Amino acid sequence: MSNAIRIKETGNYEELIPLFAASGLEIHVEDDQKPKGMITCWKAERNGQLAGGVSIENKGGFFVIGDIAVDEGMRGENIGSLLLATAMEKIYELEGEEIYLVAKAPKFFERYGFTYLEEEDVPDIFNCKTCDQRGVKCYPEFMKFEFEE
């Protein structure tokens, strides 16, 4: 049996919730068990086992990497990179010019050209921008990627 990672567009955010929650991500879903503005999501699988997931959203006209996580036992195997590349490619196909995200692991995103935003440059589209836990128990970084023309 192959050990290859397969990335599949699923659109089924609900199946990714346990992975995202186990990775420490805060999940905010609507009645249909997906985030408001979600465009689609992908899962990474190895031998039928969920290895990772990523979602993209449109919030207030901005493209956002909503959630991205890799199973703790499979980290360091390039799965996050594959998921991020897949999401970025889709946003590019949708004619996105930039991508925003809230990073708990900002060094990972730096490697792919994401840059840090100053507070005043962060659009008012993120729940954690006004969360009372920010800077207390949670220390996210707001980041942005701009496609070259």
Image (cartoon, grey):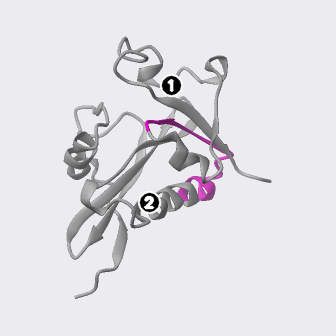
Element on which disc 1 rests: loop
The question of residue 93 being in magenta is answered with yes
Residue in view at x 49 percent, y 56 percent: 84
- Along the horizontal axis of the image, is 45 left or right of 110? left
Pointer 2 or 1: first along the chain: 2
Give the quarter of the image for residue 10: bottom left
Element on which disc 2 rests: helix
Whole-percent x and y of residue 30?
A: 27, 31
- Along the horizontal axis of the image, is 16 left or right of 61? left
Nearer to me, 63 or 7? 7
- Along the horizontal axis of the image, is 59 left or right of 53? right
Q: Nearer the viewer, mark 2 or mark 1?
A: 2
Query: Is 110 situated above or below 133?
Result: below
Outermost residue, right side: 149
Whole-percent x and y of residue 85?
A: 53, 61
Residue in view at x 52 percent, y 30 percent: 141
Whole-percent x and y of residue 113?
A: 66, 49
Which residue has dot 2 on it?
A: 83
Outermost residue, top side: 132
Whole-percent x and y of residue 78?
A: 44, 65
Amino acid type shown at disc 1: Ile
Give the quarter of the image for residue 119: top right
Instruction: Check residue 125 in the rendering and tell me which mark sits there, or answer none.
Output: 1
The question of residue 94 being in magenta is answered with yes
Residue in view at x 40 percent, y 64 percent: 79
Residue in view at x 50 percent, y 25 percent: 125
Nearer to me, 65 or 81? 81
- Residue segment shown in magenta: 90-104
Q: CA distance from mark 2 to mark 1?
A: 23 Å
Amino acid type shown at disc 2: Leu
